[in-house]
Image (cartoon, helix red, strand yellow):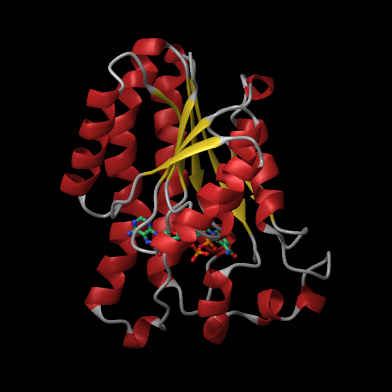
Amino acid sequence: MKRYALITGASRGIGRAIAIELAKDGCSILLNYKSNQAAAEEAKRLIEEAGGEAELMPFDVSQPDAINAALDAWFTAHPDDYIDVLVNNAGIVDDEIMLAMEPEQWHRVIDVNLNGFFYCTRRVIEGMVINHHGRIVNLSSISGQVGNVGQVNYSAAKSALIGATKTIAKELAPKHVTVNAVSPGAIETDMVRASEEYMPEYMRDISNIPMRRLGKPEEVAYLVSFLCSDRANYISGQVIGINGAAL
Ligand code: NAP
């Protein structure tokens, strides 16, 4: 039986690296993205080049109707399968200091980073529960652990993901479904470039990161790969930082 892994926001950055790594682990990848078709096609090509397989599954994680339409179609085409691995990775930033933040910026970031996690997880866990096996990994952030100037919306969403991770880890433990949060520091992707204006010194200036460099998307992917493996059967409800000793 094939093991299916849905990775949200897998067209670029950390999500793409996770998709490639899980494909190398033998998972068949459901590669979600929002709108960057070219990047998604390139991610799929890289997975296939590595000997894996992937199908594109575009939807906006903040739109429950779109999620349900995509997953209904998939479940109809795969009546005997379920999604064993869910990586809630899709995320955005829209930085502004609290004093100037518009309600739209607040809601947009909460909708994608937090509500997106809820909609996707709610739709996918039934199969894990019925099959008594599953892995959920939520991408939090160092910003959700210690705060970050200009990121009240993002910090709030990433911090909330930690609480949600711990709660559903407890709910799903009897069903052999593990749920963990991975909390990266500054990783070299488009997102970090977008946040540059508000990045505090300790993240922008690599001399303030004890390891003196940004992290690589692949390094986050290796951690997610381990958490999704049977070697991590007894690890659940945890927040695992990956930040070059920055926290
Ligand atoms: P990124 O390079 O900006 O890539 C974002 C990905 O999310 C893209 O695949 C994008 O799809 C997708 N996406 C955005 N909005 C979406 C939506 N509404 N529905 C579905 N997909 C959507 O981001 P990243 O740096 O790899 O970050 C990945 C995750 O790690 C995020 O949750 C982020 O908060 C977290 N994180 C990142 C860092 C860092 O330093 N980079 C640090 C801590 C935590 P399109 O290509 O279609 O736009």
- Depicted 179 relative to depicted 131: above or below: below
Q: Quadrant of residue 130?
A: top left
Q: Residue at x 55, y 71 (%)?
A: 190
Would residue 139 appear left or right of 229 to someone viewing this image? left
Q: Quadrant of the C terminus?
A: bottom right
Nearer to us in this view, 23 or 90: 23
Would residue 219 appear left or right of 16 to someone viewing this image? right
Q: Residue at x 66, y 49 (%)?
A: 220
- Depicted 125 relative to depicted 110: above or below: above
Would residue 104 appear left or right of 215 to someone viewing this image? left
Q: Position of residue 155 (x, y in %)?
A: 45, 64
Q: Position of residue 67 (x, y in %)?
A: 24, 44
Q: Quadrant of residue 203?
A: bottom right
Q: Position of residue 129 (x, y in %)?
A: 36, 16
Would residue 199 appear left or right of 134 to someone viewing this image? right
Q: Is residue 15 visible?
A: no
Q: Is residue 164 visible?
A: yes
Query: Residue reaching furthest left?
Result: 65
Q: Residue at x 37, y 68 (%)?
A: 153
Nearer to us in this view, 194 or 82: 82
- Depicted 204 relative to depicted 152: above or below: below
Q: Position of residue 208 (x, y in %)?
A: 78, 75
Q: Residue at x 47, y 35 (%)?
A: 166
Count of marks placed on residues: 0
Q: Quadrant of residue 246?
A: bottom right
